[in-house]
Image: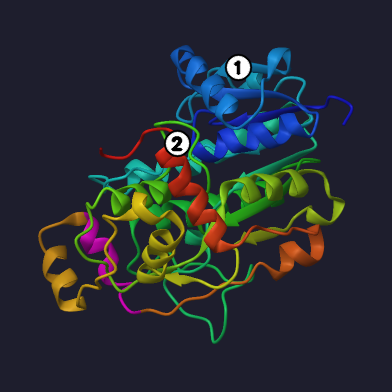
Amino acid sequence: MSGELVLVTGGSGFLGAHCIVELLKAGYRVRTTIRSAKRETDVLAMLRAGGVEPGDRLSFAIADLMSDAGWPQAVAGCDYVLHVASPFPPGVPKHEDDLIIPAREGALRVLRAARDAGVKRVVLTSSFAAIGYGKMPPGSFTEESWTDPTAKVSAYVKSKTLAERAAWDFIAAEGGRLELAVVNPVGIFGPVLGADHSTSTEFVQRMMNGAMPGLPRLSFGVVDARDVADLHVRAMTNPAAKGERFLAVSGDFMTVREIAQTVKTRLGDAAARVTTRELPDWLVRIVGLFNAEAAQLVTELGKVKNATSAKAVRVLGWAPRSREDALAATGESLVRLGLLKK
């Protein structure tokens, strides 16, 4: 690379940090947004855990998705933008707008700033949440599928769907020469780079800490953060990615029980506290009456979903690691960084 400058929003996040690692390894210069200068040391520590020493090829910009301040400076001189930052709280928000407004307005704020600065292309991190809820296709979910936000879906699912729709509408109506590509990952696993990681990796952490006495009858997709970061970089530069969405999933979906069994098999003694006992649906439904997080799972109980990343493989030459390797890497990193109960 000719040292082109890429803005990564949300560099202190799990996927954001992996994207920075991938870009630095590929020879790009990177600027990343953080909400507070205090996070600089956290980001640098995560990058070192990911195997890179950024030196003078990394710079920081202070910007918040809920404010216009700082965004013109953040995108100034950038060739590309990876808009990774998005709220994904571990709990349930008091009101769905607490998630929807930052996700949608943040995406539009970044796109406007990128357009005005003459950026070539923005790669937006959306989610399988914008693809696979509200109605089931006859076969696997593909990039042609869209979640129905009017169906009974969680605030997070609705926020990702409405934010991605708003981004495509913006490009069509007022994007000018700015190009957009979108990556839609399933559950993102892989090596944790610090104590601040993702909701998906926290799921493995809770399993390994013995904090899940039983497993709900759910299934979801698995993908490694390193492969999602690689897909972002491919979507950023490949001419064929302009105006396209790309599902990021490795192989078929797994049940929660299959995930637990994989972690137990691959991690051995470190996963001694992982249970493989499945909870009956009626029990999860009862818990859902009193627990908002459990309530979000109820509509998905027993649903057999699947999705395909054939498009990313065909168009961009993407080749993700196996599901099992992604899950094992999560557990191994939690052990290595001392993030499990003693």
- Which mark identifies residue 60? 1
User: Does dot 1 land on a helix, a strand or a loop?
Assistant: strand
Q: Residue furthest bottom?
A: 138
Q: Is residue 165 visible?
A: no
Q: Which residue in the protein does label 2 denote?
A: 336
Which SS type dominates the magenta stretch? helix
User: x, y percentage for residue 70?
Assistant: 57, 17
204 in magenta: no
**Left/right of residue 207 with respect to residue 53 in the rendered view:** left
Q: Residue 97's image quarter?
A: top left
Q: What scheme was used to colour the molecule? A: rainbow
Callout 2 touching callout 1 (CB < 8 Å): no
Q: Nearer the viewer, residue 70 or 128?
A: 128
Q: Quadrant of the N terminus?
A: top right
Indicate the amino acid at tag 1.
Phe
Span highlighted in magenta in the image: 293-302
The residue lying at 53 percent from left, 18 percent from top is 69
Indicate the amino acid at tag 2.
Arg
Q: Alpha-carbon distance for marks 2 and 1?
A: 28 Å
User: x, y percentage for residue 90?
Assistant: 31, 45
Q: Is residue 309 visible?
A: yes
Closer to the N terminus: mark 2 or mark 1? 1
Label count reads 2
